Amino acid sequence: MARGRKQGGGRKEPRFGLAAAMADLRLDPKDRIPAGEDAPKKSAAKKKPVEPDDEDDVPAREPKAAPPKPKPSRGQSRWGLSIGRMAYWALVCGLWGVIALVGVVVWAGAHLPPIQSLEIPKRPPTIDIVGVDGTMLAQRGEMAGANVALKDLPPYLPKAFIAIEDRRFYQHWGIDPIGIARALVANILHRGVSQGGSTLTQQLAKNLFLTQERTLARKLQEAELALWLERKYSKREILELYLNRVYFGSGAYGVEAAAQRYFGKSAKQVTIGEAAMLAGLVKSPSRLAPNRNPEGAAKRAQTVLAAMADAKFITEAQAQAQIAHPSVAVKPAGAGTVTYVADGIGEVLDALVGQLEQSIVVETTIDPKLQAVAEAAVIDELAAKSVKFNVSQGALVAMTPDGAVRAMVGGRNYADSQFNRAVTAKRQPGSAFKPFVYLTAIEQGLTPDTVRQDAPLDLKGWKPENYSREYFGPVTLTQALAMSLNTVAVRVGLEVGPKNVVRTAHRLGIASKLDPNPSIALGTSEVSMIELVGAYAPFANGGVGVSPHVVTRIKTLDGKLLYMRQSEPPAQVIEPRNAAMMNQMMQETLISGTAKKAEIPGWVAAGKTGTSQDFRDAWFIGYTARLVTGVWLGNDDNSPTKKATGGGLPVEVWTRFMRAAHQGVPVAALPNAQGSGLAPTLAQITSQISAPSAPGANAATTARAAPSGRGTTRPEAAAGLDGWLVDRLFGGQR
């Protein structure tokens, strides 16, 4: 055999290893191992060694395949793998989500003050400005009414808030998962924010401790604080805190402040419909405030009433009755124009009481009823005739003969312009300044019957003319003043001396700078309305100088007195006899002169009209023994009117206001030289004034010089209204 192989072409060398084993190996499909199964194990027995001589004669042995296992279907394999993977990744994501949530909560909590140190913050200081009768005129700061106990409120008031804001208030523990889920579904369906999931406790936490920003961090902090509030306070305490702190728009915080602002009554007295309207405001206080959007507020109140009926807090009949007669916000007396007064008070409070650390009540001399009448008189007159006469603005000041301001209208519309034309604006008074010229003449020995010439006048090229451009020749001073003859006023002014005229005006109450030149007799130097009206007051009270004033007392809410206006000794700035003669002269203005339309049935009144150059300003300052009232009409840009004169629109406004102000008031005569020959004292005059005085108010007057004009304490040009007058008007003393 060996020889045969040798003859056949040589010896083949044996091959060992993996290559030799795999050389002739062939597998058919049945021998393949199914996926996922382990490879067959090798036999523990050792293979029998092959004899070298038999190597080429024995065929290679194929490995014996393991018996195949049952093979799962392809669908079952994929389904099992998918479920397993989903469960795995769900577990991973859930774990990381929990970790992230815990981290965010910890981060949000880290930006809060320590819970153990949290306290309910004090209310910010508020300023309640009240009238002479104690009624609320205005509020400054964040308007916060007094805290009202839950037991003192009508039961349907808190229930209105629960019905519309947090139906499950008594079931949850600060956070309402059901409410959050309901709000989430509603928002998804409406593709926007249509409902909120915050509880009353969460809203309280936001109002007390957080800002109004809409962020996830703020919501988390809100939730943490809500849980803290629920642990620390009872449900009743939380509800009471909420009702006394929630914001209702228009600067009102708490149900008491909101009820006073919108309905003019205490929260203890609101009706079901008013309670529903208050509860509806929480959603959007600025947009739904009933004094700005009555239709929107009424519609929202209907939603609240329906929710209250659904929650069985009221009957369906009660809800329908309130819907049929919706609540209406009331407008406080003088609500718009009294804000001019409030602004002036706010400017001097620091000087009067220092930095505020607690809420205060400022008692004023303002009469709410007279303020409302004054506001209506100015606004209605302008609405009817502003276009015809090209007049855009007006102002009115009314004060008692002792200087207590009862009404002040600083402009036509406070919302359009906050500039106070009654105090800050300075305008030419025109002929309304002439009483100071004639008083100076009376003090120098002239009388109402003194005759002076009414004729053309030429002063180095300046030629003053009468309004009618007519001249009447010899006339008495009374006639000249009543008819407002310019040439006579200039002649008299030159006769007594312009400097003496200026001294007289300053002595009586004018604080602005006055130029002592010949034209001063025609009122060419600018003054403010408040000082001009105050300077007329001595004519009404028998010659006693006054300081116009508004503030009488300032106290805390618990009654602690912080400020009281100090009385000053009265000073006679006009001799009673001279004051009586001036009253007789100015009465003629209303009888036969330029103010014949000014009439108050049963009352003796006096005054003077004024019209500045080119009809830029129209004035009338008139008075009785009860009130001294001035009216100004014109344009802020000092543009001419269409011949609006003091005897026209101002007299009409003055007459409407004064007639209403004197209704039901005992008649009193102006001080004059008739009868006993003695003028009544200031105390006698003020005792006839029926307007109630604020408790502790003082009819203070300021010390001034004797009628001679020597030693006057009035500041001249430098101080003006920005200092001396404004401070004294709103309560400051210097």
Image (cartoon, rainbow, N blue to C red):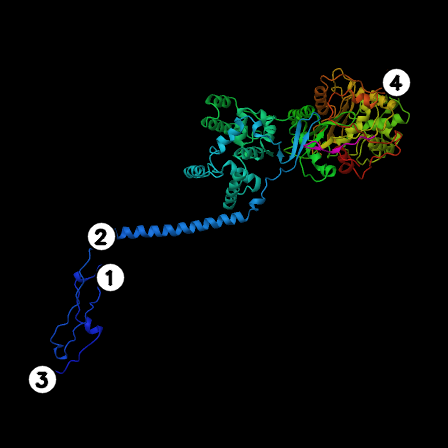
Image quarter where the C terminus lies is top right
Callout 1: few (<14), some (14-19), or many (20+) C-alpha neighbours within 10 Å? Answer: few
Range of the magenta residues? 555-568
The residue that disc 4 covers is 677
User: Which of these two is toward me, 564 or 155?
Assistant: 155
For the residues labelled 3 and 4, the Cα–Cα distance comes to 180 Å
Which numbered disc flags the more N-terminal residue, 2 or 3? 3
The residue that disc 1 covers is 38
CB atoms of marks 1 and 3 within 8 Å: no
Counting from the top left corner in percent of width and height, residue 701 is at 81, 29
Residue at the extreme right of the image, as rendered: 445
Three-letter code, disc 2: Ser
Which numbered disc flags the more N-terminal residue, 4 or 2? 2
For the residues labelled 2 and 1, the Cα–Cα distance comes to 18 Å
Label 1, secondary structure: give it.
Answer: loop
Label 4, secondary structure: give it.
Answer: loop
Callout 3: few (<14), some (14-19), or many (20+) C-alpha neighbours within 10 Å? Answer: few
Which numbered disc flags the more N-terminal residue, 1 or 3? 3
Q: Quadrant of residue 336?
A: top right
CB atoms of marks 2 and 1 within 8 Å: no
Label 3, secondary structure: give it.
Answer: helix
- Circle on res. 73: 2
Q: Which residue does the image show at 67% across and 37% down from the upper left?
A: 358
Three-letter code, disc 1: Asp
> In the image, which is nearer the foreground, mark 4 or mark 1?
1
Q: Is 474 on the left or on the right of 556, as rendered?
A: right
Residue 558 shows up from this direction: yes
Q: Is residue 59 above or below residue 150?
A: below
For the residues labelled 2 and 3, the Cα–Cα distance comes to 60 Å
Counting from the top left corner in percent of width and height, residue 640 is at 71, 32
The residue that disc 3 covers is 3
> In the image, which is nearer the foreground, mark 3 or mark 4?
3
